[in-house]
Structures are given as C-alpha cells and as structure tokens.
Image (tube, rainbow, N blue to C red):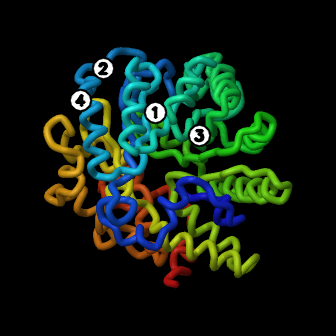
C-alpha cells in the first residue's frame, strides 16, 4: 500500500507509521521489531453480492467449518500476544455474521485496531452508530465505478445506492470512512468522476486497488488494463491528488497491489521536482515494496493462514490447530520462507530489475496465475525494460 498523498504532500495519516519507518524494512515476521503483521481476516465467506473480481469466490450461502465465536475470540487473543497492530475484518460480507460486534469489541479491548472492509449495503444508521461506539478505526466501502458500472461489477442492481447510503450513515455519526476501488477495464473511465464523488460526499480517503488474478478475478484477467492504460490512470490519480492538496482539501489517496506504482511515481518526479523525488525515494526505501508473508498476513473463514488474501491456495497452517504466531514464524514452509527473502527466487524481468529494493517482486499471485511459477514475473508491472534498468540507487 502506497500513500500518494504522503509522498506528494508530506501529510501524515494513520497507517504511515506502519508503512514508513526505518525499523520496518529488515523485519521478517511483522511490521516492525516486536510487532506482528497486519492481519486481513476473511472472517466469513458468505456475501450478499456477486462481484466479478471476488478473490474468495463468495456466494450468498452458508459455508461450513467457519471459526465459531469461541474459536474467533481465542484467535484474537493469539494476535494480541503477537502484538498484531491491526485486524481487518473482511469477507464475503463481514456484517452478515451476527458476532461481528462481539469480536471487533474484543479486538479493541486487546489493543488491536479493528478495521472493516465491506460493501456498505448493510450499514444502516443503527449499524453505523454501533460501529462507531465500539471503536472501529476505519470503514472501507467498496465502490467500483458510478452506478451502472458498479452494479454491473457487483452483480446486484441497487448496490451503488445502498453503498452511498452506508457511507452517509457512517459520516453522520462521525465514523471514519473511505472508498475502495478495484481498477479494471469496465470502470477505469469512471475514476475522475469517483474523485469528484469524494469531494461531493465529503469522503476523505480512497484506496485504488489494481486487479489481482485470484478467485473469480482469475477468470477476468482480460479485464485488466494494458500497461499504457495503467500509466494514464496513474497520471490522472497523481494530478487529482495534487489538485486536492492545492485547493486545501485533505484527501488521503492510496495505491494498492502494484508496486510498480512506486517506481513510476519516483521516475515521474525525478526531473519534474528532484527534491520531491528524493523524498519519495526515501519513503519507498523504508516501505520496502510488497511484504506479503512478512508484514501482511491473511486468515480465511476456516482459520487457514495464507501469505495474503490472493494466495489462499497456499496454506501455511490453521489457527484451530496451532497458534498464529507459531505458524507465521515457522520457516519450514518453502513458500513462507521464500517470501521472507524472495529476491534470489524471482524469475523473469523481476529477477533482473534494478528496483527490487522498493518493489520486492510485486504480487506473486499474478506471477503464478500467468506463468505457473509462484516466483514468476508479475505481468502487471507496467515499467518498460529501459525503466527497469534505471534503478540501483
């Protein structure tokens, strides 16, 4: 996750201390010394929507073997013992499970910051107030385009309007809320309008996600942007972020799931504003690129641990059988051990790229989906061969 706002303006937001600290880069098991990873928890697989890109291939049905409330409470205790800083409740749709508030409240009591990744359609005024009251740090609501594009992508008519209502209900009670937008061919032309929507609805944060080929998203690889289109999108988002800052609007804009963005941003400002470029590069060195299997973990609805949410076909262990910390620090698994020090294992363009110190091989799920090799090159890297050789600072 890269904060364009911080890199372009220097503004400080929550989460920066997890992404940009000198102590984080050389850690093998967490965000910094003495702390575990951020954990994304697909706490239920059941969902009320039918998103085309869903990495967990969720449906509107009951899934067997999900963690019980008692097992989930014990899991949160284990995360607290590992000093995990943040727990992201995701799904499916996490608000479908009736024990969400019990578990989120327990996380707060254990000193873990709970955040919520939701489609927003179930957030009534009463639910928004409960979310606020128990201390959820942030609510990310997925909107993948304006009304027509979003509802097509989400597979349910009316999803856009319900999500907007959920955002308004959060804002009405003072709950911190923002947008999550997965970029693809069917919606990228809506990005400018989505940033207008942020201003109209007084939304302070947006995360732009690049498409990762996993779950149902693996079936729509052809919906990903070309490299040229990705560069155009980045240019637009960068300029809109700068425009927000120029007009005194405090909007946090983040890019997620493609660390080529880091290099592209640095190269864009290298001649345009050398001083800003040096600041960007300094932050990128501390960030260290993709840290799946290190500072970021995923646990699915059945308790299986994975390097990230897009590699759920690679199981590292199950929290019903072993404590999370024991699983996360056990280097007998070749995938997990490799991710801790992946540079010698990378293949193709990733292996020879001079920007590995700020990218770290990008997303393994995309590389594996296209090449069949977990360590294969990431095809969504949109840097040219010439740009790949321009690093080495």
Instruction: Tell me whether the residue at label 1 lies in contact with that at label 2, contact meaning CB atoms closer than 8 angstroms.
Output: no
Q: Is residue 346 above or below residue 14?
A: below
Q: Residue at the location (71% across, 81% down)?
A: 274
- Distance from the alpha carbon under mark 1 to that under mark 2: 16 Å
Q: Is residue 149 above or below residue 86?
A: above
Residue 335 on image: x %, y % = 24, 56
Q: Please give left or right for residue 381 compared with residue 99 in the image.
A: right
Q: Which one is in front in this view, the residue at disc 3 or the one at disc 4?
A: 4
- Which residue position is annotated with label 4? 71
- Distance from the alpha carbon under mark 4 to that under mark 2: 16 Å
Between disc 1 and disc 2, whose residue precedes?
1
Q: Which one is in front in this view, the residue at disc 4 or the one at disc 2?
A: 4
Instruction: Tell me whether the residue at label 3 lies in contact with that at label 1, contact meaning CB atoms closer than 8 angstroms.
Output: no
Between disc 4 and disc 2, whose residue precedes?
2
Q: Which one is in front in this view, the residue at disc 1 or the one at disc 4?
A: 4
Q: Is residue 146 above or below residue 289?
A: above
Between disc 1 and disc 4, whose residue precedes?
1
Q: Work out whether residue 190 can be spotted.
A: no
Q: Work out whether residue 68 can be spotted.
A: yes
Crowd band around label 2 with a 10 angstrom C-alpha radius: few (<14), some (14–19), many (20+): few
- Distance from the alpha carbon under mark 3 to that under mark 4: 29 Å
Residue 331 on image: x %, y % = 18, 60
Q: Nearer the viewer, residue 232 or 327?
A: 327
- Which residue position is annotated with label 2? 63
Q: Please give left or right for residue 28 compared with residue 141 in the image.
A: left
- Which residue position is annotated with label 1? 54
Between disc 3 and disc 1, whose residue precedes?
1
Q: Residue at the location (46% across, 33% down)?
A: 54
- Which residue position is annotated with label 3? 180
- Residue extending farthest right: 247
Q: Please give left or right for residue 98 compared with residue 176 in the image.
A: left
């Amino acid at each position: 996750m890269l904060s364009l706002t911080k890199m372009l303006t220097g503004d400080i937001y929550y989460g920066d201390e997890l992404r940009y600290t000198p102590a984080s880069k050389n850690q093998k098991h967490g965000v910094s010394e003495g702390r575990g990873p951020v954990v994304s928890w697909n706490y239920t697989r059941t969902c009320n929507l039918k998103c085309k890109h869903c990495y967990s291939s969720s449906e509107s049905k009951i899934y067997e073997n999900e963690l019980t409330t008692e097992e989930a409470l014990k899991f949160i205790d284990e995360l607290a013992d590992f000093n995990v800083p943040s727990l992201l409740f995701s799904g499916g749709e996490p608000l479908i499970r009736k024990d969400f508030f019990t578990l989120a409240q327990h996380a707060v009591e254990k000193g873990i910051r709970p955040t919520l990744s939701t489609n927003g359609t179930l957030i009534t005024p009463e639910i928004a107030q409960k979310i606020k009251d128990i201390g959820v740090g942030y609510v990310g609501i997925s909107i993948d385009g304006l009304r027509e594009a979003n509802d097509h992508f989400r597979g349910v008519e009316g999803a856009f309007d319900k999500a907007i209502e959920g955002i308004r209900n959060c804002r009405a009670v003072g709950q911190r809320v923002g947008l999550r937008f997965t970029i693809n061919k069917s919606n990228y032309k809506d990005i400018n309008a989505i940033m207008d929507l942020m201003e109209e609805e007084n939304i302070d944060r947006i995360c732009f996600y690049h498409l990762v080929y996993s779950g149902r998203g693996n079936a729509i690889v052809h919906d990903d942007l070309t490299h040229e289109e990705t560069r155009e999108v980045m240019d637009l988002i960068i300029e809109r972020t700068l425009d927000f800052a120029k007009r005194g609007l405090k909007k946090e804009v983040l890019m997620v799931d493609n660390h080529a963005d880091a290099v592209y941003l640095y190269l864009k400002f290298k001649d345009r504003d050398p001083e800003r470029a040096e600041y960007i590069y300094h932050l990128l060195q501390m960030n260290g690129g993709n840290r799946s299997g290190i500072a970021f973990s995923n646990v699915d609805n059945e308790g299986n641990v994975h390097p990230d949410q897009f590699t759920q076909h690679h199981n590292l262990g199950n929290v019903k059988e072993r404590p999370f910390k024991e699983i996360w620090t056990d280097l007998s698994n070749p995938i997990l051990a490799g991710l801790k020090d992946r540079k010698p294992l990378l293949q193709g363009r990733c292996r020879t790229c001079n920007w590995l110190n700020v990218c770290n091989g990008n997303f393994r799920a995309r590389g594996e989906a296209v090449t069949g090799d977990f360590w294969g090159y990431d095809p969504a890297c949109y840097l040219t061969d010439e740009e790949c050789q321009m690093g080495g600072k």
